[in-house]
Image (cartoon, rainbow, N blue to C red):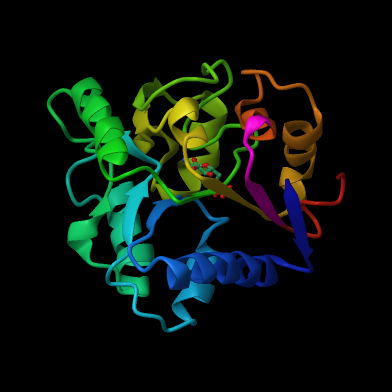
Amino acid sequence: MEIFVSPDAAAAGAVAAGILAAVIRRKPDAVLGVATGGSPLPVYRALAGHEMDMSGVRAFALDEYVGLPAGHPQSYAAVVAHEITERLGLDPAKVAVPDGAAADPEQAAREYDAAIGAAGGIDVQILGIGHNGHLAFNEPGSDLDSRTRVEVLAARTRQANARYFSSPDDVPERCITQGLGTIMEARQLLLVVAGADKAAVLHEALNGPVTSQCPASVLQLHPHVTVVADAAAASLL
Ligand code: GLP
């Protein structure tokens, strides 16, 4: 596992963007796994500054809420479109997000998992970490070999994400998330972590026991993990 520590979140974003840019330069049709949440935003901003042709890049989002009306500004489809597809100049036809509005979300989740495999798998999966150790929306208790599926969000996750909604009650209760087993199949994992509030969970994930109680601890089992953290998040490592 490689760990890069930068003074602040913007600098960490620049380091992660440099890693992604190198992959895309080598493989212009690379398959990226893209995460939402606050931590990876500086990565996409810095990557946009590289001004490369990214029209061949394919991308799969990690997760999506179930039950938001189509086009809701906080749906991950909308966030990915705005923060990633448009910012980086990706071809929208090559960017996939789980269908949280599907009539049968479980079926949509299975199809999404299969689509990642059909694309040849993910070259680099960008990840953030939740305060409770979640990866994507794999909450504590998720099987380490789980596949893309419908999950119920933990109360703490709904609270953390309430900042994006006009009322905490508006945060959906369910989501579709790539499973931990799905994530572990990506050829490289790029974990981006910023802020003192993530220091304890980052330490637990990287140095504690590998357990489904801390889903991000599964990273210890992957052969190619790169962690990019700011100094505050890395303070307990
Ligand atoms: C969200 C996302 C995760 C993200 C995490 C941390 O709920 N589903 O993919 O990594 O929580 O988010 P943030 O970076 O905003 O702290």
Horizontal side of residue 71 vs 169, given as left or right: left
Write the residue at 53% across / 55% down.
38
Where residue 80 sits, quadrant-wise, is bottom left
Q: Is residue 225 magenta?
A: yes
- Vertical placement of residue 80 versus 115, above or below: below
Where residue 18 sits in the image (x, y, percent)?
Answer: 58, 71
Q: Is residue 132 visible?
A: no
Horizontal side of residue 103 vs 146, given as left or right: left
Residue closest to the eye, 219 or 25: 25
Write the residue at 45% across / 20% down.
146
Q: Is residue 216 visible?
A: yes
Where residue 28 sits in the image (x, y, percent)?
Answer: 36, 69
- Vertical placement of residue 114 versus 232, above or below: above
Residue closest to the eye, 165 or 210: 210
Horizontal side of residue 145 vs 109, given as left or right: right
Q: Is residue 71 magenta?
A: no
Outermost front residue: 26
Residue closest to the eye, 153 or 52: 52
Where residue 185 sits in the image (x, y, percent)?
Answer: 47, 35
- Vertical placement of residue 228 versus 132, above or below: below
Write the residue at 49% across / 65% down.
23
Outermost right residue: 236
Quarter holding the C terminus? Answer: top right
Where residue 97 sits in the image (x, y, percent)?
Answer: 28, 46
Where residue 120 sits, quadrant-wise, is top left
Residue closest to the eye, 93 or 170: 93
Quarter holding the N terminus? Answer: top right
Boundaries of the magenta span: 221-228
